[in-house]
Image (cartoon, rainbow, N blue to C red):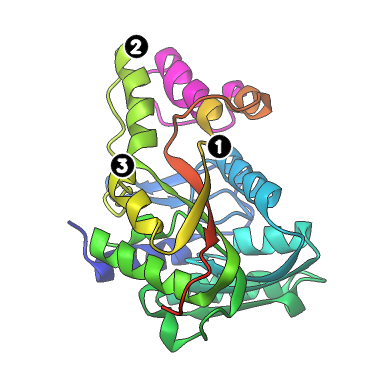
């Protein structure tokens, strides 16, 4: 099992690896999951079209104004894209990897019309009480950040801290790895003779059998969405049967463009969006 410091150092090293002008993903160390990401997006997800799907899904569900916390914001790409598309949002981005925050601050400084609406700071989502008041935010988003904590206990602590920072009636868009969504995808892969996806060493996928009852302590669960099911079925199942197993991923393959254009159907994937509404209860 990975430790907090190991995961944190991984993300700091990922931030240091990134370079401008990259038009194609470069694998640095496949075993340890080090890579140089697509230019502009940075090194938090290899698949640039899946990153676009994430952002479009968030925009679809976000209100048109408010104060937003992006907890585990990484290099700030998602944060700044949300602000670019929704002009009346203001955001704070927090991440425990200081190299990622350094990159996020440089990113936002270059973006006209956004720099005054975004602030990035180093911080731990399991200890947000030392940074923010109760109910300080109207909206909270996490994008593949809880799954980069080292244990279910740490994930529960972070969720509790996020609930504390969100005002009563506020919206929490939790976009995280789901064991059940991945299991659905792996059933399809098994049916066509492909091996399962097991995940990378620094990710701990959330088990919805434990997650949903815990979320219900603080939130009304409005919707659970497998937002990338069609895309991942075509690119991680169908395309896999057409390529050599020893060949590295080519994210410019026409299948990725085709899959990006099709409507989403099904419950499979790596991640799900949990749309949550903060309960009107006593302070945490």
**Labelled disc at residue 192:** 2
* Neighbour tally class for label 1: few under 14, some 14-19, many 20 plus, Cα within 10 Å: many
Rounded to the nearest angstrom, the CA distance separating label 2 from label 1 is 23 Å
| Nearer-the-camera pick, 55 or 14 | 55
Pinpoint residue 89: horizontal percent, then vertical percent: 74, 68
- Between 44 and 116, the one nearer to me in the picture: 116
Q: CA–CA distance between discs 1 and 3? A: 19 Å
Verify whether residue 283 appears in magenta: no
Residue in view at x 60 percent, y 25 percent? 259
Q: Which residue is mark 1?
A: 227
Instruction: Identify the residue at horizontal 46%, vertical 70% (top origin).
Output: 162
* 111 sits to left or right of 138: right
Residue 50 x, y percent position in the rendering = 56, 40
User: SS at mark 3?
Assistant: loop
* Residue stretch in magenta: 232-255
Residue 148 rendering spot, x and y as whole percentages: 35, 58
Q: Earlier in the sequence, mark 2 or mark 1?
A: 2
Quarter occupied by residue 158? bottom left
Q: What number is the disc on residue 199? A: 3
């Amino acid at each position: 099992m990975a430790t907090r410091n190991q995961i944190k150092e991984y993300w700091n090293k990922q931030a240091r690896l990134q370079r401008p002008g990259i038009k194609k993903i470069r694998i640095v160390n496949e075993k340890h999951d080090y890579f140089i990401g697509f230019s502009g997006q940075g090194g938090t997800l290899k698949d640039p079209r899946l990153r676009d799907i994430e952002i479009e899904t968030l925009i679809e569900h976000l209100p048109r104004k408010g104060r937003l916390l992006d907890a585990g914001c990484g290099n700030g790409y998602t944060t700044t894209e949300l602000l670019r598309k929704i002009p009346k949002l203001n955001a704070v981005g927090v991440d425990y990897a200081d190299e990622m925050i350094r990159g996020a601050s440089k990113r936002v400084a270059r973006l006209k019309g956004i720099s005054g609406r975004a602030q990035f700071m180093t911080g731990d989502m399991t200890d947000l009480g030392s940074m923010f008041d109760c109910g300080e935010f109207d909206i909270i988003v996490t994008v593949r950040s809880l799954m980069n904590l080292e244990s279910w206990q740490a994930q529960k602590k972070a969720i509790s801290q996020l609930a504390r920072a969100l005002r009563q009636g506020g919206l929490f868009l939790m976009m995280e790895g789901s064991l059940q969504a991945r299991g659905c995808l792996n059933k399809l892969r098994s049916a066509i003779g492909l091996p399962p996806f097991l995940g990378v060493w620094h990710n701990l996928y959330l088990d919805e059998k434990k997650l949903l009852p815990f979320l219900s302590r603080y939130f009304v669960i409005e919707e659970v969405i497998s937002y990338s099911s069609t895309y991942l079925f075509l690119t991680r199942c169908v395309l896999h049967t057409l390529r050599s197993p020893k060949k590295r991923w080519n994210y410019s393959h026409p299948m990725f463009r085709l899959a990006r254009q099709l409507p989403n159907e099904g419950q499979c994937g790596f991640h799900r969006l949990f749309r949550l509404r903060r309960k009107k209860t006593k302070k945490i």
